[in-house]
């Protein structure tokens, strides 16, 4: 993990994390603002926090360039395989969850109800070009990386998992919270193991497209 200078830089990372919490809590609580639906609002939030991450971390672009130059084929392969593995976990969970949680079926329906009124093409483009890549650039490549730089890598992983899962509580949908927690642990571990935003972007983006567009549960 890249260490931060004490004081101002630590407060900066904490402040950006707090802003992200506010933005995403509002999103999951209200889901739309007038003509702006959930997907557009989600994409806008991600653009905001990711832009702030790059402004705060002057070395981020250099890290990404190095990440792209080193072992790209292996990273893409692992990213694709990991997306398939996570999708398989959720496929099993889709069968088991209603047997364990009485709220599971309605919770899953509420997740997919977010697609109402939005074209599959627009959702696919936002997921593939903004949401999937941006979430990994912010939550793992910036927040987990830098939170670990202020403490220890394991603490950065825990903090990123907790914040990522916690903002979904505003949805009032426990199935969405559980799904977010599973994803946070999985992609957080993937970043912890490989420290590759590119690998995580491939994994997250493919999983999003499978789960919400091509093979929804």
Image (cartoon, helix red, strand yellow):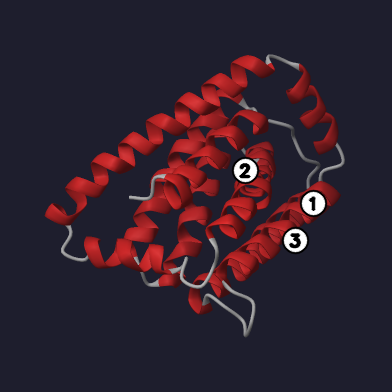
* Label pair 1/2, CB-CB below 8 angstroms: no
According to the image, label 2 marks what residue? 136
Nearer to us of marks 3 and 1 is 3
Q: Position of residue 154 (x, y in %)?
A: 53, 34
Task: From this view, report whether residue 140 is shown above or below residue 99.
Answer: above
According to the image, label 1 marks what residue? 7
Query: In whole angstroms, how far apart are the C-alphas of marks 2 and 3?
Result: 14 Å
Mark with earlier residue (3, 1): 1
Task: From this view, report whether residue 49 is shown above or below residue 138.
Answer: below
Q: Quadrant of residue 100?
A: bottom left
Query: In whole angstroms, how far apart are the C-alphas of marks 3 and 1?
Result: 24 Å
Extreme residue in the left direction? 99
For residue 217, side relative to residue 166 (left or right):
left
Q: Position of residue 41 (x, y in %)?
A: 63, 69
Q: Quadrant of residue 123?
A: bottom right
Which quadrant holds the N terminus? top right
The residue at the point 78 percent across, 45 percent down is: 6
The one nearer the camera, 175 or 36, is 36
Task: From this view, report whether residue 180 is shown above or below residue 193.
Answer: below
Task: From this view, report whether residue 132 is shown above or below residue 65.
Answer: below
Give the class, few, some or many, for how many residues have Cα within 10 Å of label 2's Cα (few <14, many ≥20): many
According to the image, label 3 marks what residue? 48
Query: In whole angstroms, how far apart are the C-alphas of marks 1 and 2?
Result: 26 Å
For residue 215, side relative to residue 40 (left or right):
left
The residue at the point 70 percent across, 64 percent down is: 44
Q: Secondary structure at mark 3?
A: helix
Give the class, few, some or many, for how many residues have Cα within 10 Å of label 1's Cα (few <14, many ≥20): few
């Amino acid at each position: 993990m890249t260490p931060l200078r004490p004081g101002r830089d630590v407060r900066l990372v904490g402040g950006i994390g707090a802003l992200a919490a506010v933005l995403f809590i509002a999103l999951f609580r209200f889901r739309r603002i007038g003509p702006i639906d959930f997907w557009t609002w989600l994409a806008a939030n991600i653009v905001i926090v990711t832009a702030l991450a790059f402004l705060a971390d002057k070395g981020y672009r250099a890290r990404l360039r190095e990440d792209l130059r080193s072992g790209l084929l292996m990273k893409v392969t692992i990213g694709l395989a990991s997306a398939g593995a996570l999708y398989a976990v959720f496929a099993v969970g889709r069968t088991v969850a209603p047997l364990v949680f009485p709220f599971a079926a309605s919770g899953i329906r509420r997740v997919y109800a977010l697609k109402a009124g939005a074209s599959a093409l627009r959702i696919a483009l936002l997921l593939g070009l903004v949401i999937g890549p941006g979430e990994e650039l912010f939550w793992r490549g910036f927040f987990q990386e830098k939170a670990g730089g202020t403490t220890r890598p394991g603490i950065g992983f825990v903090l990123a998992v907790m914040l990522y899962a916690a903002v979904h509580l505003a949805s009032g949908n426990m199935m969405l919270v559980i799904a977010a927690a599973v994803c946070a642990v999985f992609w957080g571990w993937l970043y912890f193991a490989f420290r590759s935003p590119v690998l995580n972007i491939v994994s997250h983006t493919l999983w999003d497209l499978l789960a919400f567009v091509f093979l929804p549960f």
